[in-house]
Amino acid sequence: MSDMPERAGRMVDDERPTLLLVDDDEVFRRVLARALERRGYAVTPAADVASALSLAQAQAPEYAVVDLKMPGDSGLCLIEKLIELDPSTRIVMLTGYASIATAIEAIKLGAVHYLAKPCDADELVAALNKGSEGDSTIPVAGSPLSVDRLEWEHIQRVLKEHQGNVSATARALKMHRRTLQRKLGKRPVRE
């Protein structure tokens, strides 16, 4: 019998919970890794889905923070693969391109929470440890979404339905392809 502690069916070399941090922005990844380590996590950083998957196969993490948009496969693909490796991994999707469609898809695939950048380490820790029962104390928005935000959400949903194909999405929206590309290049409207 080993002296090493066992956590959620995995052997770890210290008492800290393991966290896989996947983001292609090197500076953001380094700063966030340091902040999460100060909060008690054993952080393993990765810059893309392929390297993150390789690290997770060597040791399935207890927690994962996954960026949505990276070169190559998206973070959504990684969520699915991490859950296949270990269904108890608690995953938070992190993105600068927040949309209702991607948030719903991330949750369906197994993420426990979805946060829009910028966010801080304390928000991430709270999201990672949030229960799956939901929070009925969150106030209901007093005003409806703006027309610009509704347009952004609709475009994201149609783009997802067409597997990211911009030309097919433009045809479905009855919009010129360049107009759609310009709209996709903008950040989502903040509410």
Image: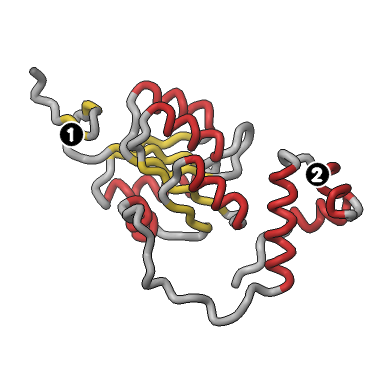
Query: Which image quadrant is residue 86 in?
Result: top left
Please say whether residue 35 is visible from this viewpoint.
Answer: no
- Residue sitting at 41 percent across and 71 percent down? 138
Earlier in the chain: of badge 1 and badge 2, it is: 1
Residue at the spot of label 1? 14
Query: From the viewer's perspective, is 99 left or right of 82?
Result: right
Q: Is residue 47 above or below residue 105?
A: above
Q: Is residue 181 above or below residue 190?
A: above
Please say whether residue 150 is visible from this viewpoint.
Answer: yes
Are dots 1 and 2 in contact, CB under 8 Å? no
- Secondary structure of residue under mark 2: helix
- Residue sitting at 41 percent across and 36 percent down? 45
- Residue sitting at 66 percent across and 67 percent down? 189
Residue 37 point in image, percent of width and height: 29, 46
- Secondary structure of residue under mark 1: loop
Residue 53 point in image, percent of width and height: 46, 27
Residue 190 point in image, percent of width and height: 61, 69
Q: Residues within 10 Å of mark 1 (few under 14, many from 20)?
A: few
